Image (tube, grey):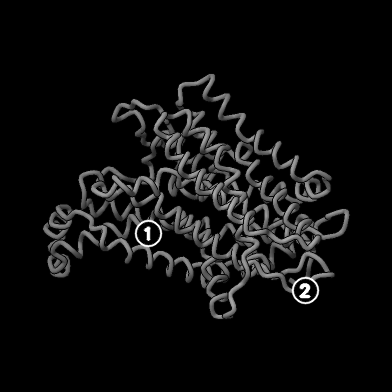
Amino acid sequence: MASHAEESLTLSSSPARPARERFMGLEWLRFGLGVFIILFHTLHVYKPLRVWTHYITDLGFFATSTFFVLSGFLLSHVYLKPDRHYGMREPARSFWIKRFSNLYPIHIGSLILAVVVVQLVAWLAITPGDAVRTFRFVSYDINRPVLFAGEMRHLMGNTELFVNLGLNLVMLQAWNPFYLTFNPPAWSISVLFFFYLWFPWIGPALLRLKHYARALAITCLIYIVPALVVIATTNFDTPETGILHRNPIIRMPEFVAGILLYALYARRRDAGLALSRGQVAGLLALIVASFCLGQWFLTFGSAFYYLLHDGLLLPACLAAVYLAARAPAAGSENVNTWAVKLGGAALPMFALHIPLYTLYTRVEKIVRGEPTLCLTGHWQACTQAAGEITLSFWAYPIFLAGTIAFCVVFQERFVRAVRRRIEPPLMRWFMGDKRA
């Protein structure tokens, strides 16, 4: 999600302030959002627990929206000059190369892992549905209350497969409004890349505005308009569901809101204005009330789902980012170091958790079945025994801890290593930087 400077969040945005401004609260928020999205996409598997886990998973899209807001906030802090012109600290091409060099290894790594895992699952065929699951299998984005069993299922033909593979290779997969392919959560990387392409223009322009609060309110209102149009004119079908879910233009207000939020934050910080206890309590109350009302609104059907997904929760997202930005760093450097590590692993957590969970569940079934049969070469008997195992929620913490650890290592060892290899030649080719 970010360069090393952005990951550590230590770049000062004003020469008049201390040389290092540390947003450790935002690091912990990024990590928390990564955990939230994992819970959102996996807790529903444990059917006996849905009586209470749905309170966690129903509004899980809050994590992605907040992540987009946070991205706009951080990029503004790191890459925009604090003078009255708010220009970029470096040329746009240099910015794009850095963003691409950080995003692409995460995206390609998760894509390869997803394809390998789904083919492995199909080969093992532990559950009845595993045998038909390949990377061609997709589900249409439909949010109608009544659905037929086969209405959402689809196997891509050769042309569809080729087109969608091409879209994934160039990080344009979010523009497919009909279905998600290969590694579904990676659509967020595609949207982030679109935001990055526009940031050198919209970032400085937004910070030059005089009335940030008014612009932020207008942005929140604009964001909800597409959902209102869909509710008024469609039947919650495809492609409108996919468009509202992940179209980069539709989701742009979240990123814009993050930039404007940073402008408000910087203005108040430079004026020495801190949050009072009452203001902190008010922002926390806004977040809690948004979740409680959101749960209630969902009982009224698809229309309110669209409104919550595209607009109604945006003020709560802004409140969460603002509160985290104001949170002080820990007194222990070890704690702050881990905040940076875990925050840096947030985007890999978004991108990798589905293939990792798919792999984990099959391993759990094998381990809790008759694993000795696999060790002795009796594959069919081993997988048959594994197919009879019901997943245990008590083993879920193992998956969660393992995923977090894997993503930390993935970010620090794989993503950074690949970035060090691809960024210098890109700088030489597109910037003429012979030192790179």
Mark 2 and mark 1: Cα distance apart in space: 42 Å
Q: Secondary structure at mark 1?
A: helix
The first of marks 2 and 1 along the sequence is: 2
Above or below, comparing residue 314 to residue 331 in the picture:
above
Q: Is residue 242 left or right of residue 13?
A: left
Q: Secondary structure at mark 2?
A: loop
Q: Amino acid at mark 1?
A: Leu
Residue under pointer 1: 356
Residue under pointer 2: 18
Q: Amino acid at mark 2?
A: Pro
Above or below, comparing residue 6 to residue 62 in the picture:
below
Estimate how packed mark 2 is, as few (under 14), some (14 to 19) or many (20 or more) residues with alpha carbons within 10 Å. few
Query: Which residue lies at the image location 65% right of the left edge and 62% below the top edge?
Result: 326
Residue placed farthest to the right in the image?
84
Residue 87 percent across, percent down from the top left: 83, 55
> Which label number is shown at residue 143?
none
